Amino acid sequence: MSDSIRVKGYASVANVSCGFDCIGYAISDPGDVITLSKRKSSGIEITMSGYGSDSISCDLEKNTGGKAVLSLLEAIDSQQGFKLHIEKGIPPGSGIGSSSASAAAAVFAANELLGNPLSLDELLIHGMAGEAVASGGFHADNIAPALFGGIILVRSYDPLDILNLPVPENLFSTAVLPDMTINTKEARKILPTNIPLKNAIEQAGNLSGFTLGLHESDFDLLGRSMVDHFAEPYRAKLIPGYDAVRKSALDSGAIGCGISGSGPSVFALSDSLEKAQVIGTAMVKEFQKVGLLSKAYSSPIHTNHPEILG
């Protein structure tokens, strides 16, 4: 059995407009790469490099990857020590699952080095423990797709019930990250504590329509369903030029467009990679108009677990 492993954890888009805290999907680019090595003594030593790494704590209790591994070790009563290096390819505060990518890759790698004592499903709760460091609570709409791949529906948190939704063959994602950050915990604070019944009913209908649209590869239904009555009306004001960026995506042929997670990343779905790239270019241009540099990531939905690198 190997004493060291390199694993890539992938970015993810959460909420997907109509699925606040319960829908997320993984994307093929960008990602974090972690290197995990066994050490003779107990404990977890953490080092960081890459995008925004100087802003991320290496304290075990404050690092998403380290906390996820610690949760796993405690669950199986193991004293195995590790050196954990996280190379950030996803900037923190990006809204595309930076913390979840690290947590998913780290807990997946630790399980591999320990001989796979837990199933992929059993790893989820430990990944969520890592994600909670950044989000302030146990949420699965980023960590579940980062760990399992594909499009995920969190049907319930108590008990935890995670469902894999079908991924239409010609469904592509664009995620555009402007040069700014939004703190996840702060972005949650601006949300209302009560939702009007009318809005809740409309959101339930949109979520149902989105789910059915995936099953039937009905992109028109997907687009009609991608309306958020819970978070976007409040978080849009945090992203300069958001309305124009969203309009540019729809005008360029997007199925739908919205805020990825807490933002500031903005995502769009489309029916071809070529169209996804055109949409990304249009969104980047709109961000430029408000003085923000940005980067577009266009890719298929990533449908697998974190990748073991050679």
Image (tube, rainbow, N blue to C red):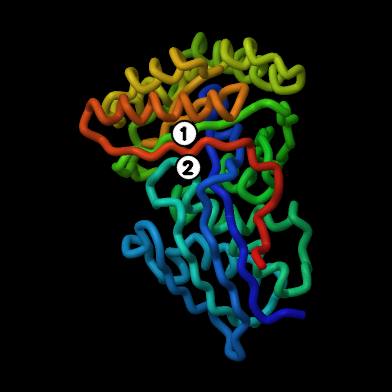
Sequence-wise first label, 2 or 1 = 2
Most extreme residue toward the left is: 291
| Image location (x, y in percent) of residue 302 | 65, 42
Between 27 and 185, which is closer to the camera in this rendering? 27
Query: How far apart in space, not on screen, are marks 2 and 1 (Cα)?
Result: 6 Å
| Image location (x, y in percent) of residue 308 | 67, 62
| Image location (x, y in percent) of residue 201 | 57, 12
Q: Secondary structure at mark 1?
A: loop
Callouts 2 and 1 close, C-beta under 8 Å: yes
| Image location (x, y in percent) of residue 288 | 26, 30
User: Where is residue 152, by image quadrant?
Assistant: top right
One can see residue 262 in this view: no
- Measuring 78% from the left and 58% from the top, which residue is drawn there? 119
- Measuring 69% from the left and 57% from the top, which residue is drawn there? 123
The amino acid type, in three-letter code, at marker 1 is Ser
Between 78 and 286, which is closer to the camera in this rendering? 286
The amino acid type, in three-letter code, at marker 2 is Ile
Between 288 and 108, which is closer to the camera in this rendering? 288
**Label at residue 260:** 1
Q: Secondary structure at mark 2?
A: loop
Tag 2: Cα neighbours inside 10 Å, few (<14), some, or many (≥20)? many
**Label at residue 96:** 2
The answer to whether 268 is drawn above or below residue 77 in the figure is: above
The answer to whether 43 is drawn above or below residue 131 in the figure is: below
- Measuring 35% from the left and 58% from the top, which residue is drawn there? 52
